[in-house]
Amino acid sequence: MSKILIDIGSTYFKVSQDEGIAQYFRNFERNIYDDFQSRCGDLLSRYAKEDVHICSSANGGLSTLIIGLTHSFSLKYATNIAYNAGINIIDTVLYSHIHEYTPPQEQIDVVIIVGGIDGVKNIFDDTLLDYLKQINFHNIVYVGSDKSHSFMQENLENILILDNIINPKLQVRGEELKNFLTNLYQQDITGKEDIKHLYEFTSNQIYSTPYIVNRSMGMMHKTFEVADPFILIDIGGATTDIHYSRDLVVDNIVSESEYDRLVFKKLGVFKSRDSLVFSAKNNEFVYELLEFLNVTENILEEHSDNATKILMQLSIFLVLYKTSLHHNLYINLQLEKLNSIIFTGGITKVLQFEEVEMIVKFFCKKLLHFHQIPSLIIDDEYKIWTLGIKGSSHVS
Amino acid sequence: MKVVTGVVGNDIHVVANRLIDISLQERGFTVFNLGVNTYLEEFIDAVIETDADVLLVSSLNGEAEGWCRDLGILKSKFDLSGVVFMIGGNLSVGEVSTEEIIPKFQNYGFDLVSHQSDLNEGLDELEALLKERL
Ligand code: B12
């Protein structure tokens, strides 16, 4: 029996069957379950529950606060693990300067505390407890030095203690935390009113979409003509994700994963349109880019198909810019080494190949001073996501 | 005893770094080697995460001054009072006398400064200082 694969996105539902892929624009008047039921209910009734595979990015994911000892190790490692587990919203606090941070007002899904290799003593004290008293969180997990285990257990109710994510050689060891966060995401989905009912349609795990996409990275060569090293840019309505091969990074993270993920939560063209426009207006190259595209900045205020296209083009540019050495992020990619770029997500339904190519050319010429560009692949049939979800169903 | 080591700044000379790693291990130190191209902030962060006793910085390409000038500022942000700070390698460009170089780097906050001198002599000096401090 064939399978049906469903992706619940923030702006679209995508449904993939043997016959091909269909896409439905979300009706925001309705909750996810009702909207989905009304459009796809009939279709789904033709499949057995075990042949239905669902992934979702619609619930926005978990919000995470990481409190760590240093930027270069604990905070960086935990951030990297969280992104790879599919988490979008990450705030960090440097423990030595904790009094300078305003505690977040909104509800935090998970607080992660980390610092020190095993054996290091006296890292955390009452300052941590005082700070935590001011915030409202659901889960709390400790992944630092073993010498602080008893302090955490004695002072923080319900704290979960996992393996230190910093190994004795000061390298990252992320599996346990990654699994914990991935599972938490599942529970979160199950707990969210409109998504939990989706389990009526499937007997399989509902995964987070970025997790599924990241899983497909290693299988990419089977389906596409990609040359290593490559990146995948997933531009959707709310967030933009980059999945990159570790060969592109020079840093101190010695990890086992071949492909990592990074999220820009404010560069989507629908839900986070305002912040995309803001970020564009503040970029030193954007006016030149708009001129190159033959439009004026007024386009940024328009609501037309053409404006959407331009915004998507800008979003490609900004993502490349923000990961390049021109911009100081927690990670920089050596984009000059890049041999392929794959584009997926809503963007592939809006932009033509040439429109994507134009932007990449502009970027390579302006920022890398290259006249050659990497090979470009547009995943307009959403093969990547189906690859990942099928792969995951084999594993689980 | 724990030592954090590596080559500071945009410096890719790796040979000495490997030798230093091996020599320190032979002398019984636990070594955290951050390798080449390491920024001062990363060194300090590594000392904090490992609670190291020594930070041993190498610089070979002549850029030490530019990369290490801010050590004092970084040291003042954290409590690193028990840590020994050492630097060695080729600490300047061209022919500058050792007498000139040593006080300069001491002023930046290094306890031990070893310019174009033998590695083993340098490490003997380090061990002597650590003994003294005990
Ligand atoms: C091999 C080499 C290279 C190779 C490096 C390959 C590699 N990945 O390691 C390449 C070709 C890439 C290279 C590039 C450059 N190099 Co070069 N390179 C050398 C060379 C010939 C040998 C270095 C070496 O490996 N020596 C063997 C090791 C074991 O010795 P060592 O490095 O001196 O270290 C010893 C001591 O200094 C000491 N030590 C080191 N650190 C510490 C720390 C402490 C605490 C202590 C106690 C002791 C200590 O212990 C070691 C063992 O005794 C030296 C010249 C020379 N003969 O030394 C130039 C030299 C180091 N390079 C130099 C320069 C200028 C460069 C470039 C800037 C050249 C350029 N214009 O492009 C670039 C810099 C690139 C960069 N970003 O860093 C200069 C530095 C000048 C200065 N400091 O005043 C040197 C001295 C050549 C010269 N005389 O001009 N280089």
Image (cartoon, rainbow, N blue to C red):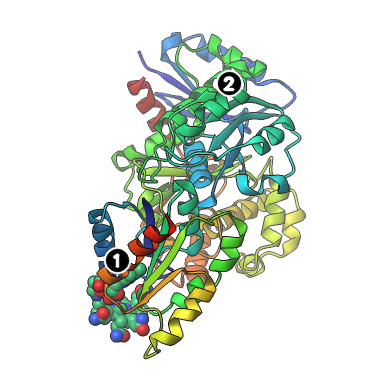
Q: Secondary structure at mark 1?
A: helix
Viewer-nearest residue: A234 or B133: B133
Q: Secondary structure at mark 2?
A: helix
Q: Chain of mark 2?
A: A
Amino acid type, mark 1: Asp
Rendered position, A260 above or below A17:
below
* Residue at image coords 59%, 55%: B78
Ligand 1 within 8 Å of disc 1? The answer is: no
* Residue on which disc 1 sits: B124
Rendered position, B1 above or below A150:
below
Q: Position of residue A24 (x, y in %)?
A: 59, 28
User: Looking at the image, can residue B116 be seen?
Assistant: yes
Rendered position, A383 above or below A55:
below
Task: For marks 2 and 1, give the CA distance.
Answer: 60 Å
On residue A189, which mark appears?
2
Q: Quadrant of the N terminus of chain A?
A: top left
